[in-house]
Image: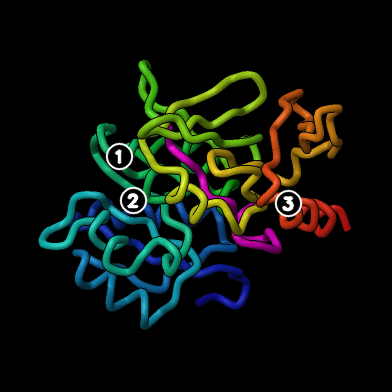
């Protein structure tokens, strides 16, 4: 790895020309250095432990173990920043569900690659881990929400409804599973069927009927149950300090 490089890169693609293409594009970004190349998923899993790269450019379709299976076997929490490479655009939704930073369709244009590298540098210079993103299917494809865009989440039968300002999105996932994904990013239970992002709370007040209400910056008024009240207030105060 070059002394001038800040971050290490693993390039995984079963096509030598594709790997060479990524290397050539990376020449314009000397702060990134390629430390390993892999032809299939089995090699990637071995190289990740051996080289511990900061970034992996990961082909979706590889012999044996594909790119998605690499992440499943290693877990997204133990992966470096992932940029998927593919000749097809049909894998975009599962790529973002796998917490990929970006999704590049080959052949990659220089301007598109530069935008990805800018995002990578910003991510790697950040003092903390990136916030998870939640992919919500829509009638026109999918919407990708970062957790900080979500004000609160409510249970809705077999779905969860994610509120971002006055807009809402339905996701076929239980509130319990969503809570496990977002709890570390400032979400707490307001009551049995609602999660609230602490950063969105602007005021706590007691209504005339004795009910305890969290007022959000979006204008939403969320009831806080008696059972959750003490923990909720403590979490809001801790977040504010």
Please, what secondary structure does the residue beneath circle 1 have? loop
Q: CA distance from mark 1 to mark 2?
A: 10 Å
Q: Are marks 1 and 2 in contact (CB under 8 Å)?
A: yes
Who's the residue at 43% across and 69% down the image? 78
Q: Earlier in the sequence, mark 3 or mark 1?
A: 1
- In primary-sequence order, the first of circles 1 and 2 is 2
Q: Quadrant of residue 94?
A: top left
Q: Position of residue 203 (x, y in %)?
A: 86, 37
Front tag of 2 and 3: 3
SS at badge 2: helix
The residues colored magenta run: 121-136
Question: How far apart in space, not on screen, are marks 3 and 1 (Cα)?
Answer: 48 Å
Q: Quadrant of residue 71?
A: bottom left
* Element carrying mark 3: helix
Provide the residue designation for mark 1: 106
Q: Nearer the viewer, mark 1 or mark 2?
A: 1
The answer to whether 199 appears left or right of 86 in the picture is: right
Q: CA distance from mark 2 to mark 3?
A: 52 Å
Question: What residue sits 79% from the left and 58% below the top?
Answer: 234
User: In front here: 44 or 203?
Assistant: 203
Q: Residue at x 65, y 41 (%)?
A: 196
Q: Which residue is mark 2?
A: 21
Quadrant occupied by the C terminus: bottom right
Residue 44 lies in magenta, yes or no? no
Q: Which mark is residue 216?
A: none
The foreground one among 5 and 24 is 5
The label shown at residue 232 is: 3
Q: Tell me which residue sits at (78%, 39%) in the image.
A: 201
Mark 1 crowdedness (10 Å alpha carbons): few <14, some 14-19, many ≥20: some
Residue 95: x %, y % from top left: 35, 44
Going from the N terminus, do you reach mark 2 or mark 3 first? 2
Q: Residue furthest left?
A: 64
């Amino acid at each position: 790895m070059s002394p001038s490089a800040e971050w290490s890169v693993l390039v995984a693609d079963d096509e030598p020309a594709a790997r060479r293409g990524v290397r050539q594009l990376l020449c314009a970004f000397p702060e990134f250095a390629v430390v390993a190349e892999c032809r299939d998923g089995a090699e990637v899993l071995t190289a990740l432990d051996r080289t511990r790269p900061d970034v992996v450019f990961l082909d979706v379709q590889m012999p044996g173990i594909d790119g998605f299976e690499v992440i499943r076997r290693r877990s997204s929490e133990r992966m470096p920043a992932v940029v998927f490479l593919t000749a097809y655009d049909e894998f975009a939704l599962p790529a973002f569900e796998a917490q990929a930073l970006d999704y590049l369709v080959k052949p990659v244009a220089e301007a598109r690659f530069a935008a990805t590298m800018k995002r990578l540098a910003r991510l790697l210079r950040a003092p903390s881990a990136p916030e998870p993103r939640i992919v919500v299917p829509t009638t026109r494809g999918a919407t990708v929400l970062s957790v900080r865009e979500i004000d609160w989440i409510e249970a809705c039968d077999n779905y969860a409804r994610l509120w971002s300002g006055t807009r809402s999105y339905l996701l076929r996932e239980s509130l319990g599973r969503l809570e496990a994904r977002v709890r570390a990013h400032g979400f707490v239970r307001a009551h049995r069927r609602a999660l609230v992002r602490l950063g969105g709370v602007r005021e706590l007040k007691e209504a005339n009927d004795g009910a305890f209400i969290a007022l959000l910056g979006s204008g939403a008024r969320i009831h806080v149950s008696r059972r959750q009240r003490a923990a909720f207030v403590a979490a809001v105060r801790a977040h504010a300090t």
